[in-house]
Amino acid sequence: MKLLELLTQTPGVAGREERIREVIRKEMEASCDEVRSDALGNLIGLKKGSGQGKIMLAAHMDEIGFLVKYIDDKGFVRLQPVGGFDPRMLMGRRVIVHGKVDLIGNLSPSTKPVHILTEEEKKKQLQIKDFFVDLGLPHEQVKEKVEIGDPVSLRQEFARIGNNYSSKAMDDRAGVLVMLEAIKKIQQHRADIYMVATVQEEVGLRGALTSSFGIVPDLGIALDVTLAADYPGGEEPEYVTRLGEGVAIKIMDSASISDHNLVKRLREIARSENIKHQMEILPRGGTDAGSIQLSRTGIPVATLSVPCRYIHTVNEMVNRNDLEAAIDLLASFLNKTDPLDLNTGSI
Ligand SMILES: [Zn+2]
């Protein structure tokens, strides 16, 4: 899984996707007829079909991270989060400050060492604003290399753990991988297929909004990770999905309700081709489908999700077989679907 490793390890904090965009551009250029980026920075690849209709795929290329907010007179860096973090997951992490050069730093909370903490102080809930980055450099050198607004990404190596892959930014480079790999497997598709690696999903599904307005698709499919809370601490009815049980066909989340006929079609294809799948209802959270659906006068959408444990931590974990199932289902759907024949939107 060299490509997944490359995708997850390349930085692309929301609003600063330029480095990951160039990696994805190279991949798209090998499989698309045209590749361009738009004013917001979305990367759009077009693979022409033989008939009519347009299908838009969206996988967000941004990741959660930070921007440099303040540099104090000792050279310690304070951070503005970009995207949703659980501060408990930031203890003992390392980050990369993308200044004039990439600088590795330690992320630490501004508390005393544990040895000298009082019982009362130990109970204190940490907040993001309590964390700072130690770059190990004096103030003047930090000032020389780092500016307010520079992006900061989390650092964690890519690892194969049993049958799973784990890394930072699996959300949503796993979705980007599914999109790139499915396109390699399609042959006689009729629709024009627009693959969009979107920007700024983590701060409000923004890139999908402008790219779908420009493309005017007949239907949209978002590709993203979803919660797999199937580990100690979770209750079975709240698992959302289970790792290793196949691609998840989303019924709804808090940003979109998938088009009923699209869901039906995806489920039928999965059943007839024996592609391992599960149905997903996510009570809170959204994907790019939420923005595509509300574009112009409304566009039928669905989301195919890759189950992921430990979302929004640096140890996001997906299963190899779930990835394969997502690629297979998307490729079959694209091969077989003429969006103008599909009775979407009229339940
Ligand atoms: Zn995501």
Image (spheres, helix red, strand yellow):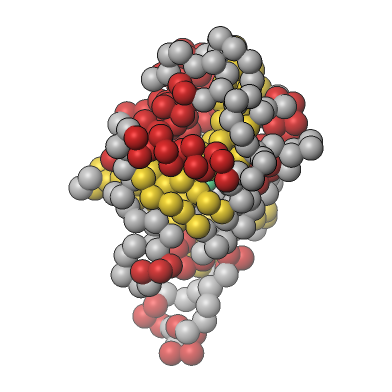
Given residues 160 and 56, the one toward you in this image is: 56
* Left or right: 36, with 173 as reference point: right
Image position of 77 with respect to 48: above or below: below
Left-right relation of 308 to 139? left
**What residue is drawn where x is 60% and y is 25%?**
341
Q: Quadrant of residue 331?
A: top left
Percent coordinates x, y for residue 56 in the rendering: 60, 28
The image position of residue 143, as x and y in percent, is 64, 45
**Would you place residue 169 above or below residue 330 in this image?**
below
| Outermost bottom residue | 119
Give the x, y percent position of residue 236.
Answer: 36, 69
Q: How many marks?
A: 0
For the C terminus, the image quarter is top right
**Residue 19 visible in image:** no
> Among all residues in the image, which is located at the extreme right?
297
In front here: 31 or 62?
Answer: 31
Which is nearer the eye, 281 or 178?
281
Q: Residue at position x 72%, y 27% from top?
A: 216
Of 23 and 260, nearer the camera is 260
Position of the N terminus, as image quadrant, is top left
Residue under the image location 46 percent in, 46 percent down: 249
